[in-house]
Image: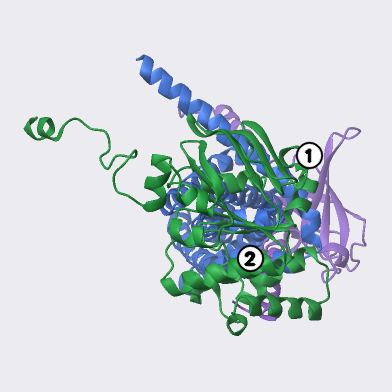
Amino acid sequence: MHHSFPDPLVSIRGLVYRRGDLVIFDGVDIDIPRGKITAVMGPSGTGKTTLLKLIGGQLRPAGGRIEVDGVDVHRLSTRDLYRLRMRMGMLFQSGALLTDLSVFENVAYPLREHSGLPESMIRKLVLLKLEAVGLRGARALMPAELSGGMARRVALARGIALDPMMMMYDEPFTGQDPISMGVLLKLIRVLNDASRMTSIVVSHDVRETAEIADWIYVISAGKVVEHGDREAVMNSENAWTRQFMNGLPDGPVPFHVAATPLRDDLLAR
Amino acid sequence: MVTMLAQLGRWGLNAVQRLGLAVLLLPAMAAGTVALLRRPMLLLRQIFSIGVLTFSIVAVAGVFVGMVLGLQGYYILAQFAAEEALGVMVAASLVRELGPVVTALLFAGRAGSALTAEIGLMKATEQLSGLEMMAVNPIYRVLTPRFWAGFLSMPLLAAVFSALGVMGGWFVGVVLLGVDDGSYWTQMVLKIDFSDDILNGVIKSVVFGFVCTWIALYQGYHAIPTSAGVGQATTRTVVLSSLVVLGLDFLLTALMFG
Amino acid sequence: MQSNRTIEVMVGTFILAGLVALFFLAIRVSNFSGELGSDSYPLTARFDNVGGLTERAKVTIAGVRVGRVESIRFDPATFEAVVTLRIDNRYNQIPDDTFAKIYTAGLLGEQYIGLDPGGSPFPLKPGEEVVYTQSALVLEDMISQFLFSKAEGGSSGF
C-alpha cells in the first residue's frame, strides 16, 4: 500500500510517539521525495508540528526510525545532530524571531554563528536573502514592528540563510490575510525550485497547501490515511479524506461531539 | 486516606523530578562557559539588564534601610547611653544580614522575575526551539550568560546596598541626631572585622546570587509555554527564591557565626 | 536597544560602583587595613590579669585613641599576660615611666588600655616595655575584698 520513492530525503518507518498516555503517532510511514514540496495535512491536534520536531531531532520517538539524507537522526551524537540541523531550515508558526534583535540581525544570526564569514560578506548575504523575500527595506525594523506575514517572511529568510537542503514549514498560512498568504505560497514554491530544496509543509489549510504541494500525506488519529499526488488525494474514495479535503461539516467526523441525546439533557435536572 | 497518600507521593515524585531537571541545568550551563568567554558582549548585555537595571532599586533601598537602622538603633542605644555604638550596630546588621538578604529579595523580585518571564516567553514564542533548529544550543546562548551575570552582579549589588546603608545610618545618626562623628566611624572600624563580617557577607551574597539566578532560569526554561504558564513560573520564582534565601541565610549564619 | 558602547559604559560604571562599595566596606567600615600598619610601632606591657581585654581593643592617652592592642599571650614563666600594643608613629614621645591601666568603657562597655604619661624626659622606643601596669578590675575580686573588709571591720551588714 505504501508508495515509496527511490532515495527519499527523509524516510520515516514505523514511527511511534506518545505524549503521556496519549498516542500521537502509531506506526507512521512517510517518504519525503527530494526536490519536491510535500504537504503533510491533518486536522488540528494530529501532531503535525510534533512530526517536524521529530524530524529535526528535537523530540525522540518511542519507536521506529527517521532517516534524513541516509542517517538515522536519533542515533546521531549531539555534535553531528547540530551539524545536520545546519542543513535544515524550519519556519515556525510564530516565526520565532529573536525579539531583541533587528530584522537584519535575525537573518544574520545563523551566518554569524556558523559561517565564520567576514562582516562584509555576511552583510551581502543577508541583503540577498532579505531581497528574496522582498523585505530588504525592512531590515532595520524590530520583530515587534512587523506584521504576522512579514515576520514569517523574515523567518523564512533566516531559515534559508545557510542554504539548507530542506525547509520545514509549520502551519505557514494560519492567520494570514489573502495577500500575504499568496506571497508565502509563491515564496515557498519559488525558493524550492530555485535552489533545488526539498520542502515539507505541514498544514490544515487544505486548499492553499494543495495548490503548491507535489505530494500529499493525510494523517489522522496517529495513522497515514491517504497519500499520493495532488489529484489522487483530492479525488480520494476515502470518505474521511473527502470530508477533510473538502471541509464538509458532517461526515465520518460527526458534527456533534459524542453526547447523550439532547432531549435527555434538556429534561434532566 | 489512600488518595491523600497517593497525592503526597505524586507531589514528592514531582518535586524530585523537578529538582533533577534543575540540577541537570548546572553542568549544561557550565559547559557553555568556555564559549561565552569568546563572546564577552553577551555577558555584558546580561550584566546590564540584570545588574545595572537592579542597581537603582537596591541603592535606594540601601539608603532607606540604613536610615531606619540609624533611627531605631539610636533610640534603643540611647537608653543605655551607648549612642557611640550606633555605627557598629548599623554596619554589623547591614554587612552580616540585611545587605545580602534584602538585596537577594529585591533581586528575586526585580531581576529574577524578569529572567523567568523573558525565558518563558522565548520558550512560548518558539525562540528557544528556533535556536535549536538553527543548530545553536539555547542553554549555551541564552542561559549561560544570564547565569554568570546574575552570579557576578549579586555581590556587587549587596556591597552597594551595605555601603549606602552605612551612609544612611550616618546621616540620621550623626547629622540629624547628633551622635559623635568620630565615634560612629571608629567604633565601627574597631568592631567590624574584615574576614568575619565583610567577607562572610560577601560569601552569603555569592551563594544567594547563585541560587536566585538558578531558580529564575530553571523556572523560565521549564515553564509551561503559555501566557498562564509563564505567569505562574514568574510567581514561583519570586516565592521560591525568597523562601530559599531566608532559609539559606539561617543555615549560613549558623555555620559562619555559630 | 542600547548600543554596545552604552552598555559597556554602563556595565563598567556598575562594576566600578560595586568595587568602590566593597573597598569602602573594607577600609572605612572594617579593620581590613589595620588602619595603623606600617606607620606604627610596637610596645609591650605585662599584666597580672587582663580581664576581658581583647585584640584590637583601643589604646588611649587622656581619652584620645593612639593605638590598638595587637596581641595578647600568656607567659608561662612568669604567669603573666604579655600584651603587645601598636602605637601610631605620630605619638612617639611617650615617656618611659608611663603607666598602663586596663579600663572599662562605661558600666557594660568593652575594656581598653589607658596610658598615663609620667614625667621622664626619655621616650619609649619601639619594642620596649611599659613597666608600670595596673591590671583589670575583676568584679568578683572587688566584691570579695569588700566583703572581707566588712568582716574584718566586725560589722554584719547582711
Colour for chain A in the figure: green
Q: Say what amino acid the circle numbered 1 marks.
A: Asp
Residue in the image at 45% along x and 45% along y: A236
- Of all chains in the rendering, the one displayed in purple is C
- Residue C117 percent location from the top left of the image: 78, 63
Colour for chain B in the figure: blue
Confirm whether residue A115 shows in the render: yes
Residue at image mark 2: B185
- Residue A229 percent location from the top left of the image: 56, 51
Quadrant location, the N terminus of chain A: top right
Residue in the image at 56% along x and 62% along y: A96
Q: Is residue C104 above or below residue C12?
A: above
Residue at image mark 1: C48
User: Helix, strand or loop at disc 2?
Assistant: helix
Q: In 3D space, how far apart are the residues under numbered discs 1 and 2 (Cα atoms)?
A: 32 Å
User: How many numbered dots are placed on residues in this image?
Assistant: 2
Q: Is residue C51 above or below residue C66?
A: above
C20 to the left or right of C127 = left
Q: Same chain for the residues at labels 1 and 2, yes or no?
A: no
